[in-house]
Amino acid sequence: MVTGQPVCDVSGTIAEMARSGIREIMDAAWQIPDAIVLAVGDPNFPTPPHVVDAADAAARAGKTGYVSNAGITELREALADKIRSRNGYDVTANDVVVTNGGVEGIFAALATVLDPGDGILLPDPGWPNFAMDAIMLRARILAYPLAAENGFLPVIADHERLCDAGTKAVLLNSPSNPLGAVIDRARMREIAAFAASRNLWVISDECYDATVFDDRFVSAAAAGDPERTISIYTFSKTYAMTGWRVGYVAAPPRAIAQIAKLQEPLISCVNVPAQHAALAALTGPQDVVAQMVSAYQERRDEVCRRLAAANVPALPPSGGFYVWADVRASGLSSRDFAFTLLRERGVAVAPGTAFGPNGEGFVRISLATEPAALYEGIDRLITALA
Ligand SMILES: Cc1ncc(COP(=O)(O)O)c(C=O)c1O
């Protein structure tokens, strides 16, 4: 290196962006042998064998080159069928783009609607990637609270209060990570009316649309206006396929065209054998999905039973696979509680503040963990609180 010369610097925006607090506790957990890890939403089920076989067959058949930015046609057609039947609104294959997981779909959706300085309403607590995306895009985050007294649902008065003339979008996440709350049809309609009145996009992260424990779930585009709604989905959670990295976005023509275009500089296209695996997941037997959902429901009931018996407040989730537990009785901040629990009792949970300032006093417990370890982890958490 030549000394005495100025050193070129990295982007201030990216350097100042905080790391995901979930990753921070995960890194600490990986240093502790035998730690019980309840900090991450990674299903403990294997990808169904027929799905793995389909990727293998595709790769062996030479389906290993670049494909269309938007994804292979067979998959997009199957996804349009799925959205019509499961999510209840009308789309064709042309309205769907296959993405590198929901993660990339959310970024592409936000990049499509936001210019630097535009406002976006984001949930607090909310999944950290939402804010990280907004920061990368130099957008303004308008954090709307999700409070226990409102069933952890968005309240229109908060949207009204926070929304300014430069606001472009409201982001919804139902079922919610980390809260497990599901926005019902009436509230979804109110949000749609608010979005229409302020001419906002509705960006709806519905990545947990299959993991629901009652009939409350409704897609934003079905309850509201599909012309102003961009919806994001994934294979990760539904089919235990987190590492395959296949998600998808449905949007009206003026937005989906931009999202398809963005695939080129972002990822070019999704891994092609993985797209064939996703097609097999969608068109093959669906009993695997029902089995996983019922396993999560059983775990949810048992975890909530144990917490309630120990007087630890927690709202049983209506969907997703997380329990949001109140640990204020510890007298510690949620971050200190989580790191102390890991250090002293070998259990990793995600601190509530990883999801925003309103997560203070709470931790997120993932149900996507093998039951014996999950229940042992809960018992240790209860002992730590006592
Ligand atoms: C709320 C939410 N949205 C989207 C995703 C995206 O997951 P993937 O990129 O694996 O599809 C996740 C993953 O944890 C999530 O929790």
Image: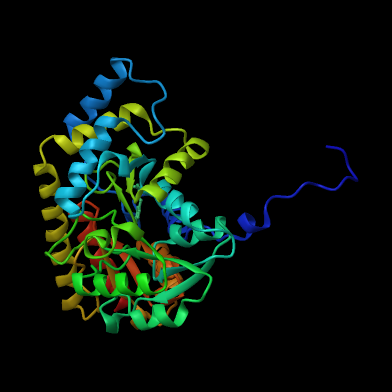
At 14% from the left and 53% from the top, the residue drawn is 293
- Image quadrant where one finds the N terminus: top right
The quarter of the displayed image where residue 340 is located: bottom left
Q: Residue 190, can we see it?
A: yes
Report x, y in % for residue 306: 17, 71
Which percent across, then down, holds residue 59?
31, 20
* Residue 145 placement, left or right of 319: right
Q: Which image quadrant is residue 17 in?
A: bottom right
Which residue occupies 37% across, 20% down? 64
- Quarter the C terminus occupies: bottom left
Up the image or down, 53 lies above or below 248; here it is: above
Front position in the image: 360 or 165: 165
Q: How many marks?
A: 0
**Chosen colour scheme:** rainbow
Image quarter of residue 35? bottom left
Along the line of sight, which residue is nearer the eye, 68 or 19? 68
* Residue 183 as seen in the image, left or right of residue 4: left
Q: Is residue 90 above or below residue 355?
A: above
From this view, report whether residue 267 is shown above or below residue 297. above
Residue 24 at x, y percent in the picture: 48, 57
Q: Nearer the viewer, residue 6 or 330?
A: 6
Taking the view exactly as shown, the residue that stands out farthest to the top is 61
| Percent x, y of residue 299 | 16, 60
Residue visible at 33% across and 57% down in the picture:
227
Q: Does 188 appear above or below 112?
A: below
On the question of residue 46 being in view, the answer is no
